[in-house]
Amino acid sequence: MDIDKLLSANVKKKSGTKCMVGSALAKLDSATKAKLVAAIADHDRFTAQGIASVFTSLSGLEMSRSPVERHRRGDCQCPK
Ligand SMILES: [Zn+2]
């Protein structure tokens, strides 16, 4: 068994869906964006639902917790 082939066949697939969090962040000014990026990284102070509520209030677009959870896991197309 070739370990390199085995590993490359099992690389995590990038989600084809556009990341709502990433596209919402892209529309914000850099100061707001920096604060939100920090909040997204802060699992102790902010739940995914809490971050989603902030985005909903900021943009007026309803966001559920699942895009935030996916973004936090890194299962999206955003640059890491
Ligand atoms: Zn993302």
Image: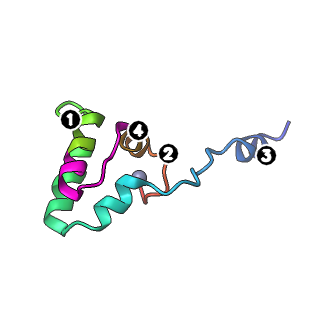
| Residue 1 spot, x, y in % from top left | 86, 36
Alpha carbons under labels 4 and 2: distance apart: 11 Å
> Which of the image's four quarters has the C terminus?
bottom left
Is the C-beta separation of discs 3 and 1 under 8 Å?
no
Alpha carbons under labels 4 and 1: distance apart: 14 Å
Of circles 3 and 1, the one toward us is 1
Residue beneath label 1, please? Answer: 46
| Residue 73 spot, x, y in % from top left | 43, 40
Residue at 40% over, 44% down: 67
- 17 vs 37, left or right, is right
Residue beneath label 4, please? Answer: 66
Dot 3, crowdedness within 10 Å: few (<14), some or many (≥20)? few
Residue at 54% over, 54% down: 17
Q: Amino acid at mark 4?
A: Ser
Q: Which mark is residue 75?
A: 2
Q: Amino acid at mark 2?
A: Asp
Dot 1, crowdedness within 10 Å: few (<14), some or many (≥20)? some
Q: Is residue 78 magenta?
A: no
Upstream in the sequence, badge 1 or badge 2? Answer: 1
Q: Which mark is residue 5?
A: 3
- What stretch of residues is rendered in magenta? 54-65
Upstream in the sequence, badge 3 or badge 2? Answer: 3
Q: Quadrant of residue 49?
A: top left
| Residue 75 spot, x, y in % from top left | 49, 45
Dot 2, crowdedness within 10 Å: few (<14), some or many (≥20)? some
Upstream in the sequence, badge 4 or badge 1? Answer: 1
Alpha carbons under labels 3 and 1: distance apart: 39 Å
Residue at 18% over, 69% down: 29
- 56 vs 63, left or right, is left
Q: Is residue 56 magenta?
A: yes
6 and 66: which is toward the camera: 66
Element at label 2: loop
